[in-house]
Amino acid sequence: MNRKASSPATPTDHGSRQRPYSGSYEGIEKHPTVQRLREYARPNGLGFQIRKIGHVVLNCRDLERSVRFYTEVLGFQISDVYPDEMVPGGMVFLRCNTDHHGIGLVGTLDGTAPNVELNHVAFEVGTLDEVLLAAKRLRESGATIDFEGRRRAGVQLAIEFRDPDNHRLEIYWGIDQVGSEGSVRPPAEWKGAHSLREAIENPVRGQDTTLRDPSLLDQLERR
């Protein structure tokens, strides 16, 4: 890794992917852009339904360096590898569950990723404690950290960071689940937080932010 860990970004930092909002979240549904975009819906009788996001393939400058980051820092496992003779730059398939791969890396990137088409890729963990453990691991590795806390829509607790090629990544827990009736949490209940402590100590309705190991938060803040 060639970058040092940074302090969590504030809402106005260059690294943040969301703008601060001075209006009332309770009235956000009346915003004309929100109303117009919400008119789009899945057509009746479409005939197929996408079940999940299957995998993401990222180009990288140094394939071995990126594989080291995704395995040794994030904990992915290698399923298969293509040499340069099969794919220009080589390709590595990595998994985090029983799917053959969730991330693919291809060594064909010329420079730092501009993050123009792809905003970020997010990875879910099973407990809130794991978010804190991931944050600790990322800091120790020297990864650039853009954000720690709770996002607004979805209300997941997250850490957002960069890989060696500047791709924006996220590790999160606690994202809202949407039932068959299709209703989501009203914007009035959103509680954006710009630190993990704030997110944990001021939870949203129905979100249990009790840590299995409460000492993790103090450990994380002692740097």
Image: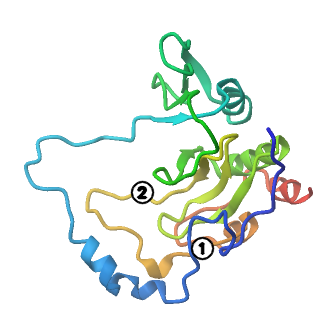
Q: Is residue 170 left or right of residue 53?
A: right
Please name the residue shown 50% across and 54% down the image.
116
Residue 192's mark?
A: 1
* Element type where label 1 sits in the image: loop
Q: Is residue 215 left or right of residue 108?
A: right
Where residue 142 sits: x, y (%)? 82, 45
**Considering only order in the chain, which callout, 1 or 2, is on the residue closer to the N terminus?**
2
Amino acid type at mark 2: Gln
- Tell me which corner region of the image, top left, top right, bottom left or bottom right, holds residue 91: top right
Check the image and name the residue furthest to the front.
Answer: 110
Where residue 36 sits: x, y (%)? 25, 76
Residue 177's mark?
A: 2
Image quarter of the C terminus: bottom right
* Element type where label 2 sits in the image: loop
- C-alpha distance separating marks 2 and 1: 18 Å
Q: As displayed, is residue 3 above or below residue 185?
A: above
Amino acid type at mark 1: Gly
Crowd rating for badge 1 (residues with CA inside 10 Å; few <14, some 14–19, many 20+): many
Q: How is the image coloured?
A: rainbow
Q: As displayed, is residue 206 above or below residue 129?
A: below
Residue 174's mark?
A: none
Q: Is residue 32 left or right of residue 95?
A: left
Where residue 152 sits: x, y (%)? 53, 70
